[in-house]
Amino acid sequence: MSGSLRLAGCQWTSTDDPTANLARIDELTGRAAQAGVRLVVHPEAAMASFAGRLDTVAEPLDGRFADGVRALAERHGVAVVVGMFTPADAITTPDGRERSRVHNTLLVTGPGTTETSYRKIHLYDAFGNRESDNVAPGDEVVTVEVGGWQVGLATCYDVRFADHFTALGRAGAQVVVLPASWGDGPGKASQWDLLTRARAHDAQAWILAVGQAWTAESVSGPYGIGRSVLADPTGEVRARLGGGEDVLVAEIDRESVERTRASIPIL
């Protein structure tokens, strides 16, 4: 069992076209694979941005988009984490209309892992937004083994809930991946920086938080600020990207997790 894991976070801006986005996932996964990584993480909403209707782009986990992710992961020889939308339920609006909702889903697939999915638990009903109008919440904290490492899964707004990350740490996660589409606004960058570091400390695990890139061209966004980050189990930042599209490549070690948990036994 390897004591280290080489991983990558691909920071980019998705569009409302799943086919075009799948091509970018393929391109950036290939770039990361050439750097020798075993795990590649893409942002939340990599399948389609929040700019369009989610129910019309949602596909099941055996649909064309997910099959495309499986194929590229196999071709590049790496495990990948990709944010997508899957069909969920229907709700009745106050005016009596029925609205289909989706699950905000992470798909984990590829060599070295058993395929797994995670449905975002904590929905972004904050700052005047109501993600729950269009997204149904998940209800299960999920970890998955990748190359002998236990990887915890979380998505964007989950980062504001410390118990989620403590639960992942107690479930054995040695690294937590956090795909995000973290909207810009007053104080949002400093909150992102603070919360990602704090959640690494709560899980006593490495955390790789991978956001959508910031773009001035977005009409209704931007739906990201960039600033993807790798923090160690004590919350120290080991690597950070800027706002633009980029790939963060790093290597993490298991000994840091074991040492932190032995010296500060909060879990």
Image (cartoon, grey):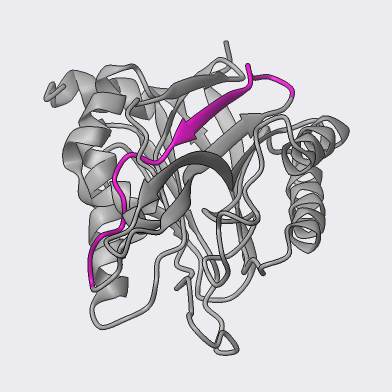
- Predominant secondary structure, magenta span: loop
Q: Residue furthest top?
A: 1
Residue drawn at x 23%, y 72% as measured from the top left: 127
Report the side of 240 relative to 30 (left or right): left
Magenta stretch in the rendered image: 111-127
> Where residue 260 appears, x then y in whole percent?
24, 28
Quadrant containing the C terminus in the rendered view:
top left
> Based on the displayed image, in which of its 4 quarters is residue 61 positioned?
top right
Q: Please indicate, yes or no, whether residue 239 appears anywhere in the rendered image.
A: yes
* Residue sitting nearer the eye, 148 or 62: 62
Q: Is 189 a magenta residue?
A: no
Q: Residue furthest right?
A: 75
> Based on the displayed image, in which of its 4 quarters is residue 194 positioned?
bottom left
Report the side of 116 relative to 75 (left or right): left
* Residue sitting nearer the eye, 159 or 238: 159
Q: Is 113 a magenta residue?
A: yes
> Where residue 249 appears, x then y in whole percent?
61, 50
Quadrant containing the N terminus in the rendered view:
top right
Q: Please indicate, yes or no, whether residue 236 appears anywhere in the rendered image.
A: no
Establish if 14 lies above or below 133. Answer: below
Q: Residue furthest front?
A: 96
* Residue sitting nearer the eye, 37 or 159: 159
> Where residue 14 appears, x then y in whole percent?
64, 66
Residue drawn at x 56%, y 54% as measured from the top left: 55
> Where residue 13 appears, x then y in whole percent?
62, 69
Report the side of 147 relative to 156 (left or right): right
Residue drawn at x 31%, y 51% as measured from the top left: 123
